[in-house]
Amino acid sequence: MVALRTEQSLTAAPKLPSYTASDTELALLVVAATAGEESAMRQLIVAVAPVMIGATRRVMGNGHPDLEDAVQESSVGFLRALAGYRSGCSVKHFASRIATLTALTARRNRRNRDRFTAHDSLDETDTRSAEPDAVGLMVQERQRRALRRILDELPEPQAEALTLYAVLGWTVEEIAAASNAPENTVRSRLRLAKDALRKRITRDPRLGAELGGPT
Amino acid sequence: MTQKPALPEDILIAARRRRLSVEETERLNELERDPAEAALTRAGRAFDAQDVESDGDAALALRMAEHALAAGVRAAPKLRDVTARSADLRAESRASGAHEWRSRSRGLLVATAVAVAAAAAAAAGGYVVVTRNAALNPTPTVAPTSAVRNAVGSPGGNAAARAAEPQQQSAATHVPPAEQLKVPAPSASARAVAEDTLSAELLFSRGNGDRRAGRMAEAASHYEQLLRGFPDSSEAQMARVSLGNLLLDQGRAARALALFDAHLARGSGLAEEALYGKARALRALGKLAQEREVWQTLAAKYPDSIFARSARERLEHGR
């Protein structure tokens, strides 16, 4: 088994151990997991779990009622997709993208199921920010919420590209590698998504105000 | 070389990752006159500020793993079970480079034999061309990184799969000639190696399949056949751990202990699993002092292993 280095003892704190598995170590785990080795599958998921959980939180919001379900589902999706993994992107990017797509779908499903509830407020009861200032917290919360609403409305390819770009902070090159698409296609999707965002802001000044403000 | 993103998308992401140059900052300010770009920059920073870990994340990560495995998920199987190869890889990654040449030579021989045994018709010519990334990606769209190629090293049985499959190489899938190995057509002894390899693989694969399907008696039977017929194969080495765990679950701790010991005596991959199994077997047999020694060994030799947590809990809390 590939021994993963951890930056803190597993017993020292209840927090998630911060794995620093190298790309090569993860690639080895992928080989073993793809061959059906359960311990490798388990280790692999634990190793990529932090990025998957992080991506899901960003896309859905910490307080979203479907968050844990989406995370669990993404772990299943990750293993299922593993045989299709290509080393053009890192394993962590590969896992993050699966978590992102799962989370986007979960948000849309929730939105379709429950259009009238306080979903938008539920998924944003998030006070766990590095920002110490309460007003700053509220502004950031509002900005995240507004962008998520826009993402919910975009066509899926554009939503995926804009999420990886704006929410996760990936470069065009990283998005292209993870989604196996040409960079120009990614740029095109981003351009269309920004056009849609621009129109929405123009049409709805309140949305513009929510997305504005200092950070 | 100074990073100098030329396109708007690149500058916006660069602004989130590093300090921009004066020139880049001016470009960013210019871009942010567009309300959409400004909104994305602000929202992006808001998302970056949100990232904090939760106390429940460790437990959630474990639940994710258990959920995926319990869902019966298996990564799509390759035509050849490459577990043996991956165990070699792990051993190689820890061992010194002294074994590298031997491992690669062995891998080359097996790959040659397996490729020809499974795709003799396709290899009617004097040579079989085996791509170095065949073990990792049967149908790659992008060539793997050099690190992975080097780690995977010699090709495994998926070469057979590649040879048997229709060629679908595009520009993206093309592997440069330098990355190809021209392998001489196999000798009779190589064919014998292939037959043995396939037989051991087949038994191991069947044992694994039965085990995952919950057919434990059949699984044990296949593993036992493998141990009898091919005791020195790498599949047999792994089967000792699988069979040991299986027997341990059935309450046959003494036999399980013998299997774990045999595995450890031969010294290869899966040592953590074998130590973990051995400790559990000793506990089941009431040999608590020996059990404690094994947990201590496990915790000391593999402190980052997922089994180390069990070791520490057992040592510290007796759980």
Image (tube, coloured by chain):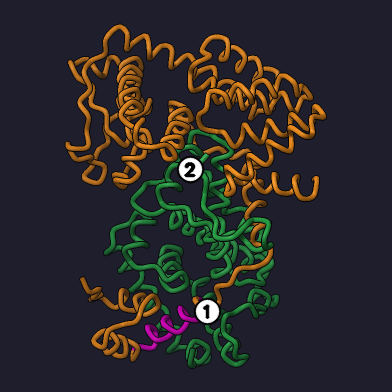
Chain colours: A green, B orange
Residue numbers of the magenta segment: B34-47
- Identify whether B104 is placed above or below A184: above
Name the spot of residue A136 as percent of width and height, x first.
56, 90
Q: Secondary structure at mark 1?
A: helix
Q: Is residue B179 visible?
A: yes
Q: Residue drawn 66% across and 18% down?
A: B220
Q: Main secondary structure of the magenta part?
A: helix
Q: Which mark is residue A29?
A: 2
- Is B121 left or right of B202, judged from the image as shown? left
- Identify whether A92 is placed above or below A117: above
What chain does mark 2 sit on?
A
Name the spot of residue A52 as percent of width and height, x first.
54, 59
Q: Residue drawn 68% across and 30% down?
A: B278
Q: Which mark is residue A55?
A: none
Is residue A79 found inside the magenta-colored segment of the image? no
Name the spot of residue B101 as percent of width and height, x first.
30, 29
Quarter of the image where one finds residue B151: top left
Name the spot of residue B159 as percent of width and height, x first.
33, 27
- Decide: few, some or many residues near mark 1? Use Cα within 10 Å; few <14, some 14-19, many ≥20: some
Quarter of the image where one finds residue B296: top right
Mark 1 = which residue? B49
Is residue B39 found inside the magenta-colored segment of the image? yes
- Identify whether A210 is placed above or below A152: below
Numbered label tally: 2
Residue nearest the viewer, comparing B264 with B21? B264
Q: Residue drawn 32% across and 40% down?
A: B150
